[in-house]
Image: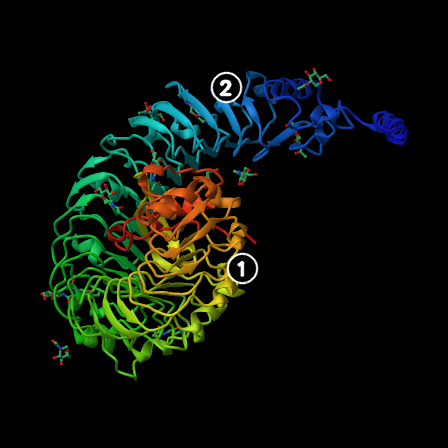
């Protein structure tokens, strides 16, 4: 280090100590008990994360990060708010020395160990938030809450044991309003919980609960929100739920409830949102539910409901969102719904409706989101005619129906508001219908796995917002229209600003078996998929303009010519599949600039020469390059070694990157790419559309 730097440090430290001295002479120290408690607390944390001891006022703890004292002369610590401060360590008992503390917020850190039991007994404490940490600990049964506490959040930890027995031991002195114990490993709800009569929000979702004690809800008249989802509750739903007269939101989804719903919805006069998806409910829906005047959202998808559903929409005047997908509904449901004129969102996908949409369905003209995928519908032509009446329709899912029908080409069809259209897996025949080009607002179009033929029409550049196009598995011929390389949304529109809510969650099971759940269209990766067609011609150099594209799939076509060097302009590209074509020439060196590329294939072409070295190219398996006219180099075989055998036996050269060299190097993957993988995007086609599901689309990399 040179001397001027040392000099500077010397000067500034001089100044610093002077500054400290000035402050010290002015400062009133905070209460010594509080100071001691805080120092005790911080001594159990990873040293110096908070910088308390480096602060200018070592003895005035009221000025420390996250500490609030009250205004009185006594300057007692009343709040300790250290959420999201990267704290690591344990909470030691000394914290209860802060005996005037009202708010303790240690959420979103990496604290571990146990929670001092005394914490819940602190006399003045009102708000306790230790959610989203790593506490692993059996909550002791004799845990009574102090009467001052009204908010407790211990969600997202590793807590276990039973809850409730003594929590509100003295019901008249308990004031708890919010209790969030979700996403832990608790296993038993005790009868005593029913003494927490002041509770308004009870979240115990995402634990290991199996049953609820009888009559648990008898006394909890103040409950407004009850989350029981994602546990192992089984049996029928207790009639006792009908005692919760003030309930606004009830979620019992993802459990193993069976049987019919209790007929208690008449007394739940304030219930707005009822979610019971992913259980095994069957039979008929109770009259009180079908006539509820308060329900706005009813989500019963993924059950075994098989009775006709006679929703009485003259009574259900507030119903806006109805999810009955993935049940065993059949027959007349579509007729029955025709009176539900205020419905905005309707999901009936994956049922056995079998037949044609009735004419009366056109009454539902307030619909914005409609899924009828895989419902055995027939007559696409009449279906589209009826859906014409839905001027505000933005999301339309019709895949896996109309098997083998002709796609209607009525030029007068108009879907002005449509942003999402999927009619895939239907073996539809015909040319790309002209009315499609009138859907100017399309963001997402999936017509994959049909028998569409002819050329892909020019004029795709009219779709200013289109960022997801899947025409794979059809019989399109001719050139790739140049308009596809001019899609504004793939060039310079920030699609994250466009967001189109799907209205209901779509689920997808990733390759690791985890379920992902997606609510917005922008979660899908920007994609052009033209694979498995009969497209000819060359790859336009202007594809390089699509800098927001994440997936380009041109596999299994008849493309010729060389791979344009300009493709390196697609700088967000994660997947590039050009395999099974007739491409010739070399792999452009410039492609090593595609730093997010994680899946790449040029196998089965007529390429030759050296595989570029560097960048993501060091991570692609040899199968990405197999079956060409003599590719060499890359991380596999130096070109010099390959020379001799090529001359002697050309057929061997073809397989020089055969499976025998196959190994997958998986380094250099960015997180977003992993998300993309898990989200099912790279799943076999079979599973992708049934429940395509993306929460967080990999963000743009620019
Ligand atoms: C901070 O300083 C006090 C004395 O001023 C000391 O007792 C305490 O252990 C220190 N804490 C840490 C975390 O270094
Ligand atoms: C400050 O806290 C003390 C001790 O809790 C209390 O007696 C006093 O009323 C509080 N003052 C204010 C202004 O909150
Ligand atoms: C605790 O802090 C976190 C992060 O700072 C904040 O999001 C959360 O709302 C706070 N909790 C309460 C109960 O205020
Ligand atoms: C509890 O904390 C979690 C995570 O910090 C948060 O998502 C949740 O909204 C909180 N619950 C309540 C009822 O405030
Ligand atoms: C319950 O709390 C009330 C009010 O705080 C008090 O008067 C009563 O003595 C308590 N009862 C018991 C059994 O602790
Ligand atoms: C509920 O509280 C009352 C007193 O308010 C008490 O007598 C009773 O034992 C408590 N019940 C349970 C199950 O803890
Ligand atoms: C359900 O709970 C498990 C842990 O109990 C958690 O891993 C999973 O993410 C939860 N699923 C949902 C949909 O909340
Ligand atoms: C449907 O519900 C079953 C349990 O009834 C569950 O195992 C499955 O994961 C759910 N499927 C979806 C897509 O939510
Ligand atoms: C449907 O609801 C209306 C209005 O509440 C009521 O008059 C009618 O009787 C109900 N119909 C049936 C079949 O329950
Ligand atoms: C629903 O359909 C069934 C069978 O077609 C019919 O008996 C019933 O009256 C319908 N209910 C409503 C409310 O339209
Ligand atoms: C369609 O949306 C517009 C604007 O939100 C609204 O004014 C109109 O009432 C809606 N049409 C129907 C039939 O719901
Ligand atoms: C489709 O529906 C229309 C209108 O209901 C009808 O005229 C036509 O015959 C139907 N087509 C077929 C193939 O069933």
Residue on which the image places disc 2: 118
Q: Residue at x 42, y 53 (%)?
A: 608
Residue 265: percent from the left, percent from the top?
23, 50
Closer to the camera, 481 or 172? 481
Q: Quadrant of ligand 7?
A: top left
Circles 2 and 1: CB atoms closer than 8 Å:
no
Residue on which the image places disc 1: 569
Closer to the camera, 418 or 555? 555
Closer to the camera, 3 or 353? 3
Residue 453 sits in which quadrant?
bottom left
Q: Residue at x 30, y 48 (%)?
A: 651
Residue 687: percent from the left, percent from the top?
26, 50
In the image: residue 604, left or right of residue 399: right
Q: Mark 2: which secondary structure?
A: helix
Q: Is residue 358 visible?
A: yes
Q: Mark 1: which secondary structure?
A: helix
Alpha-carbon span between mark 2 and mark 1: 60 Å
**Label 2 Cα neighbours within 10 Å, binned few <14 / some 14-19 / many ≥20:** some
State which quarter of the image contains the N terminus: top right
Residue 624: percent from the left, percent from the top?
38, 47
Image disc number at residue 111 = none
**Which residue sits furthest front?**
648
């Amino acid at each position: 280090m040179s001397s001027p730097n040392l000099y500077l440090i010397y000067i500034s430290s001089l100044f610093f100590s002077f500054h400290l001295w000035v402050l010290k002479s002015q400062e009133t120290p905070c209460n010594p008990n509080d100071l001691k408690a805080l120092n005790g607390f911080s001594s159990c944390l990873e040293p110096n994360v908070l910088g308390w001891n480096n602060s200018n006022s070592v003895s005035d703890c009221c000025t420390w990060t996250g500490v609030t004292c009250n205004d009185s002369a006594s300057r007692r610590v009343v709040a300790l708010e250290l959420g999201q401060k990267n704290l690591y360590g344990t909470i030691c008992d000394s914290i209860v020395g802060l005996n005037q503390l009202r708010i303790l917020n240690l959420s979103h850190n990496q604290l571990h160990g146990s929670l001092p039991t005394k914490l819940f007994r602190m006399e003045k404490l009102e708000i306790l938030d230790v959610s989203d940490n790593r506490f692993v600990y059996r909550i002791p049964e004799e845990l009574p809450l102090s009467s001052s506490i009204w908010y407790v959040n211990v969600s997202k930890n590793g807590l276990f044991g039973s809850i409730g027995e003594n929590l509100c031991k003295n019901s008249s002195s308990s004031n708890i309003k919010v209790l969030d114990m979700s996403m832990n490993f608790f296993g038993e709800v005790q009868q005593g919980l029913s003494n927490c009569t002041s509770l308004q929000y009870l979240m115990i979702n995402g634990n290991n609960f199996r049953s609820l004690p009888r009559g648990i809800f008898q006394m909890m008249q103040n409950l407004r929100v009850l989350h029981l989802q994602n546990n192992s509750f089984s049996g029928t739903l207790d009639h006792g739920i009908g005692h919760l007269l003030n309930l606004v939101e009830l979620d019992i989804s993802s459990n193993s409830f069976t049987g019919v719903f209790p007929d208690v919805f008449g007394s739940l006069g304030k219930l707005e949102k009822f979610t019971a998806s992913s259980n095994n409910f069957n039979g008929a829906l109770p009259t009180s539910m079908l006539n509820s005047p308060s329900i706005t959202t009813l989500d019963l998808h993924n059950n075994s409901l098989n009775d006709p559903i006679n929703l009485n929409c003259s009574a259900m005047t507030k119903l806006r969102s109805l999810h009955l997908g993935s049940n065993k509904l059949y027959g007349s449901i579509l007729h029955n719904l025709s009176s539900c004129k205020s419905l905005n969102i309707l999901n009936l996908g994956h049922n056995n409706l079998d037949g044609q949409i009735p004419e009366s369905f056109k009454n539902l003209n307030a619909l914005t989101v409609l899924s009828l995928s895989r419902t055995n519908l027939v007559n696409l032509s009449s279906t589209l005619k009826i859906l014409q009446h839905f001027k505000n329709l933005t999301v339309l899912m019709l895949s896996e129906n109309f098997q083998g029908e002709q796609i209607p080409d009525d030029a007068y069809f108009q879907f002005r508001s449509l942003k999402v259209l999927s009619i895939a897996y239907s073996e539809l025949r015909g040319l790309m219908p002209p009315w499609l080009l009138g859907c100017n607002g399309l963001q997402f179009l999936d017509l994959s796995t049909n028998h569409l033929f002819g050329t892909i029409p020019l004029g795709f550049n009219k779709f200013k917002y289109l960022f997801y196009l899947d025409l794979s598995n059809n019989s399109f011929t001719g050139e790739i229209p140049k308009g596809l390389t001019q899609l504004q949304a793939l060039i310079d529109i920030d699609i994250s600003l466009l967001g189109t809510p799907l209205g209901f969650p779509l689920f997808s099971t990733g390759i690791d078996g985890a379920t992902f759940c997606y609510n917005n269209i922008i979660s899908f990766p920007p994609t052009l998929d033209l694979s498995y067609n009969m497209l000819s011609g060359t790859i336009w150099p202007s594809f390089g303009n699509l800098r927001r594209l994440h997936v380009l799939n041109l596999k299994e076509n008849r493309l010729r010519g060389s791979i344009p060097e300009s493709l390196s302009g697609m700088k967000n590209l994660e997947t590039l599949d050009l395999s099974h074509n007739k491409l010739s020439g070399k792999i452009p060196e410039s492609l090593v600039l595609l730093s997010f590329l994680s899946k790449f294939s040029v196998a089965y072409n007529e390429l030759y020469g050296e595989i570029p070295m560097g960048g993501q190219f060091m991570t692609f398996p040899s199968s990405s390059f197999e079956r060409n006219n003599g590719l060499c180099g890359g991380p596999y075989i130096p070109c010099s070694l390959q020379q001799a055998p090529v001359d002697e036996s050309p057929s061997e050269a073809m397989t020089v990157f055969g499976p025998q060299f196959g190994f997958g190097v998986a380094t250099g993957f960015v997180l977003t790419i992993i998300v993309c993988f898990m989200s099912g995007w790279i799943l076999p086609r079979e599973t992708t559309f049934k429940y395509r599901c993306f929460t967080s689309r990999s963000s743009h990399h620019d």
